Amino acid sequence: VLGFEVDPVNSVQFSNHTGYAHWKGQVLNSDELHELYEGLKLNNVNRYDYVLTGYTRDASFLAMVVDIVQELKQQNSNVVYVCDPVMGDKWDGEGSMYVPKDLLPVYRDKIVPVADIITPNQFEAELLTGRKIHTEKEALEGKVMDMLHAMGPDTVVITSSDLQSSLGNDYLIALGSQKKTRADGTKEIQRIRMESPKVDADFVGTGDLFAAMLLAWTHKHPNNLKVACEKTVSAMQHVLQRTIKCAKEQAGKGNKPNPAQLELRMVQSKKDIENPEIIIKATVLL
């Protein structure tokens, strides 16, 4: 929709997402991923500007992703790897992993060092750094963000957190940090905060949508994390508001929408994805 030609490789092929009570299907292993990549390589079509990875359940598959990214970067040093390190989340203040625990060291020690942009939630940022985030200051000032930058990526966006918003409990804070090189070669860091209204429902796929749109908008605004994040978060808000409105209509008054009714209204939101009206502004932190 945003003008990118995409070669998708399914890390899992499931009948439906795992927010439903039941699902069936297969998890791609590293040998199968390698075979698919070899096919692309044999035809000399493994020429990419971006690699984007998300939900994965297999540690050897992740290790193969590292090999592929390193090979792509060897032939084109400008390849940008966007990684959504999908590992878990917090519910009622308690964090838990929803992928096997052996994926954490692979993400921390192998994946993040070759990534250029990462989009963890607060719990995943804490897992990667071994540090808890209690305040915005702990996230930003010489702590978690800097640790994540030091691991490799120049752009880090903590997509959601349970930090207290100045606008009240009904708002969700996201934080972004981008290392930029000035014309004279010195480095500067831009840091931003976004506060968006919470939507009272459990959606599946919001992290995938966030990472994909952040890739697109950082491509279009490479040196302006503020604008890229405003467009990403505003588009997310448009999609979620449309989804919850439709879901409630389908469920009927007083009924809680089910997973099928809460499927993200992507097709209906095409215009908002292409050209989002900015409804969430980012604050630049000095």
Image (spheres, rainbow, N blue to C red):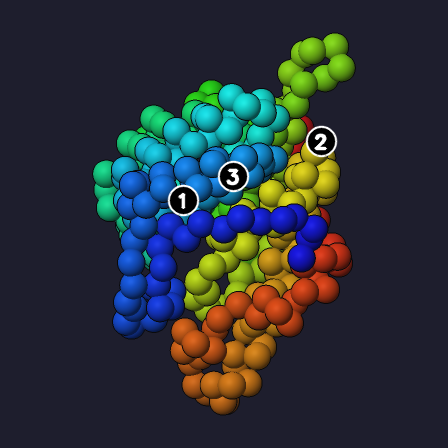
Closer to viewer: mark 1 or mark 2: 1
> Could you classify mark 3 by the number of other residues whose Cα lies within 10 Å: few (under 14), some (14-19), or many (20 or more)?
few
* Residue 261, x across and y down, in percent: 47, 78
Q: Left or right: where does residue 241 sit relative to residue 140?
A: right
According to the picture, the residue beneath numbered tag 2 turns out to be 223
| Image quadrant where one finds the N terminus | bottom right
Amino acid at the residue labelled 1:
Leu
Between the C-alphas of marks 2 and 3, the distance is: 34 Å
Amino acid at the residue labelled 2:
Asn
Circle on res. 36:
1
**135 above or below 279?**
above
According to the picture, the residue beneath numbered tag 3 turns out to be 43
* Residue 19, x across and y down, in percent: 36, 66
Q: Nearer the viewer, residue 60 or 144?
A: 60
Of the two numbered discs 3 and 1 on the same chain, state the one appearing first in sequence: 1
Amino acid at the residue labelled 3:
Asn
Of the two numbered discs 1 and 2 on the same chain, state the one appearing first in sequence: 1
**107 above or below 5?**
above
**204 above or below 215?**
below
Residue shown at the point (47%, 85%) measured from the top left: 251
Q: Secondary structure at mark 3?
A: loop
Residue shown at the point (32%, 50%) measured from the top left: 28
| Image quadrant where one finds the C terminus | top right
Between the C-alphas of marks 3 and 1, the distance is: 11 Å
Q: Nearer the viewer, residue 260 or 49?
A: 49
Q: Nearer the viewer, residue 181 or 166?
A: 181
**146 above or below 58?**
above
* Residue 198, x across and y down, in percent: 53, 61
Closer to viewer: mark 3 or mark 1: 3
